[in-house]
Image (cartoon, grey):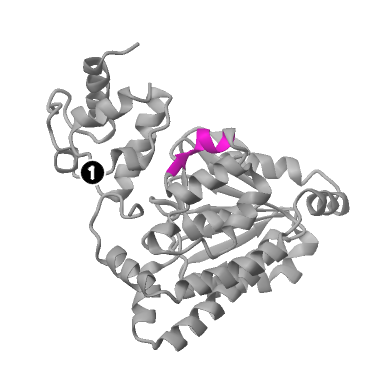
Amino acid sequence: MKSFTGKTLRWEWRDGAIELTLDGEPANEIGTAMLEELEQFVAAFPALIPDTAVCIMSSNRRAGFSAGADLRELYHRAAQLSLEERLAGVRTFIERIHAVFNAIDAAPFVTIAAVTGVCFGGGFELALTCDMIIADAMARFAFPELRLGLIPGFGGIPRLKRDVGNAFVRDLLLTGRSVNAARAQVAGLVAQLAAEGETLRAARSAAMQITKFDAVTRAAAKRFVKPVPHEDLGREIDLFCELFARPTVMAALKKFVESSDAMPYLP
Amino acid sequence: MRTLEQTTQEVLDLASKHFHVPAGSLAPEDDFFKKLGIDSLETLEMLSRLENHFGIELPDYEVQGVSDFRTLASRIQSRL
């Protein structure tokens, strides 16, 4: 399937490149609808791989790349379930997310996240599956999960640890603050800075360069520099589910859903 | 080194330019949420613009709860 248009995203293959555009209202929150369509995207890999050198992931939403997991959906669904059902449901969802994110992380083509605006939580974790992040001056990255009594659950910390130094990982995780693209580039997270509104153009330019290389060599180089941290990812699922069992999480989710605060991602 | 007054004026000018408010209509003591009518995403946008303009990092938690331009400018001043 070389093109697809769903409710939360679309993709189109052209001249060796796939452009995957996130387009879910209001800010590309990752819930069951986006997960299902990302699963369809990954299911299309066998057909796409032979003719694909690169995939560019970007957003069509003004807010930015993605505000993260769909916490409203999570809260409202979880609130209707018993604790046992809630934990089972969350584990199933997280395991499905990990399967999709691991497949994108290990894809034999090169993946580029073109990031502007908010790139928070689960959205940041999706960007971290990509081989390169190209960001503009308005991009902001954050892991605000601790305010919910959780750690990032979509593979974010193992992937961030793989890519950057401990000082940056701990600062982001333990303060919950957001950082801009310039800071993220200094930390080694952002590969290229683009002018405001120019991330997609910069990503397309990089893609044109990437398509010039031999496919076998390109895939081997990627595997060599970007191993998937499976062991840490498995431990993350267990720790996330363990923390999710605590009653403080549902209280924090409720507070977030009902918040009209200017910085709802901070405690 | 900028003075606090200079920093405050630059914050006002930046807010006026990017949130399309007439120049000179903003005052240091104004509540920028009310005056600019900004939501949580636009708050982040303003944070990025301030950091880029002044070439600083301004941790979100240092401006959490701040709502007037003068206090915002003093937080920026402490990072210059």
**Viewer-proximal residue among A11 and A15:** A11
Residue A97 visible (yes or no): no
Instruction: Tell me the quadrant of the picture where the N terminus of chain A can be found.
Output: bottom right
As displayed, is residue A79 above or below residue B55? below
Amino acid on which the number 1 mark rests in the picture? Gly
Residue A48 visible (yes or no): yes
B17 lies left or right of A99: left
Q: What secondary structure prevails in the magenta region?
A: helix
A145 lies left or right of A19: left
Quadrant of the rendered image containing residue B43: top left
**Viewer-proximal residue among A221 and A54:** A221
- Start and end of the magenta stretch? A178-185
A169 lies left or right of B48: right
How packed is label 1: few (under 14 Cα within 10 Å), some, or many (20 or more)? Answer: few
Q: Which residue is drawn at 41% across and 28% down?
A: B52
Q: Which residue is drawn at 60% across and 66% down?
A: A236
Quadrant of the rendered image containing residue B60: top left
